[in-house]
């Protein structure tokens, strides 16, 4: 009787262990899949024109998605084009590093101003900061990023004319 019980246990214990292991693998894979699926809707930062005193260039309300880096300057190769004589061809660069935002003056002639102070090199900025480049006042806003939103830095919305 004990021998039959031992044989039955030896047959079914490995199958039971295999079943428990398989359920664990399925649970881990399902969690990973769901976390990837829902992480597509995440927080995003946008560069926003707050005010434009220059008379030309981007209008108040225009927004650009900050994915990794955004170049700002007079040249058409920039993501944000400010075609004003006081703005250098490659004036400044805004970069997202994790959840931090950094702005760097690219040795522009007239400088990049953050909260009324001209910066040298790079400086961390937040949503409360005001950035001025050639009479254009920029700010950063935080919002949701949709899963189908482009990851390239480009104009997201244009101000009403």
Image (cartoon, helix red, strand yellow):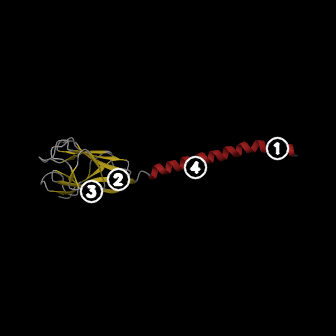
Few, some or many C-alpha atoms within 10 Å of disc 4 (few <14, some 14-19, many ≥20)? Answer: few
Q: CA distance from mark 2 to mark 3?
A: 17 Å
Residue 3 position by quadrant: top right
Between circles 2 and 4, the one closer to the viewer is 2
Residues at circles 2 and 4 in contact by the CB criterion of under 8 Å:
no
Q: Which residue is mark 2?
A: 44
Distance in Å between CA atoms under marks 2 and 4: 30 Å
Looking at the rendered structure, which numbered label has been put on residue 6? 1
Q: Quadrant of the C terminus?
A: bottom left
Element at badge 1? Answer: helix
Q: Position of residue 114 (x, y in %)?
A: 23, 53
The first of marks 4 and 1 along the sequence is 1
Nearest the eye: 137 or 43: 137
Q: What residue did someone put label 3 on?
A: 129
Observer-side mark, 2 or 3, equals 3
Give coordinates of residue 20: x percent, y percent.
66, 47
Camera-side residue: 25 or 136? 136
Q: Secondary structure at mark 4?
A: helix
Tag count in the figure? 4
Q: Nearer the viewer, residue 1 or 75?
A: 75
First reached walking from the N terminus: tag 3 or tag 4: 4
Q: Residues within 10 Å of mark 2 (few under 14, many from 20)?
A: some
Q: Circle 3 sits in a helix, a strand or a loop, which is it?
A: loop
| Most foreground residue, 59 or 11 | 59
Give the side of residue 26 with respect to residue 106, left or right.
right
Specify which label sits upstream in the sequence, 2 or 4: 4
Q: Which mark is residue 27?
A: 4
Work out whether mark 2 precedes mark 3 in sequence or the reverse, and give the earlier one: 2
| Whole-number angstrom distance, CA of label 3 to CA of label 4 | 44 Å
């Amino acid at each position: 009787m004990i021998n039959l019980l031992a044989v039955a246990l030896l047959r079914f214990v490995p199958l039971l262990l295999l079943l428990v292991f398989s359920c664990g693998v399925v649970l881990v894979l399902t969690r990973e899949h769901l976390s990837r699926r829902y992480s597509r809707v995440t927080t995003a930062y946008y560069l926003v024109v707050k005010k434009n005193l220059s008379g030309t260039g981007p209008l108040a309300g225009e927004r650009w998605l900050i994915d990794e880096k955004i170049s700002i300057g007079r040249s058409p190769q920039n993501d944000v084009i400010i075609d004003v004589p006081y703005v250098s061809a490659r004036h400044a660069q805004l970069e997202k590093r994790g959840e931090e935002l950094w702005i760097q003056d690219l040795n522009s002639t007239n400088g990049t101003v953050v909260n009324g102070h001209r910066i040298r090199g790079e400086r961390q900025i937040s949503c409360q900061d005001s950035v001025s480049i050639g009479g254009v006042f920029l700010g950063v806003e935080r919002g949701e990023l949709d899963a189908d939103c482009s990851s390239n830095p480009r104009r997201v919305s244009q101000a009403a004319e």
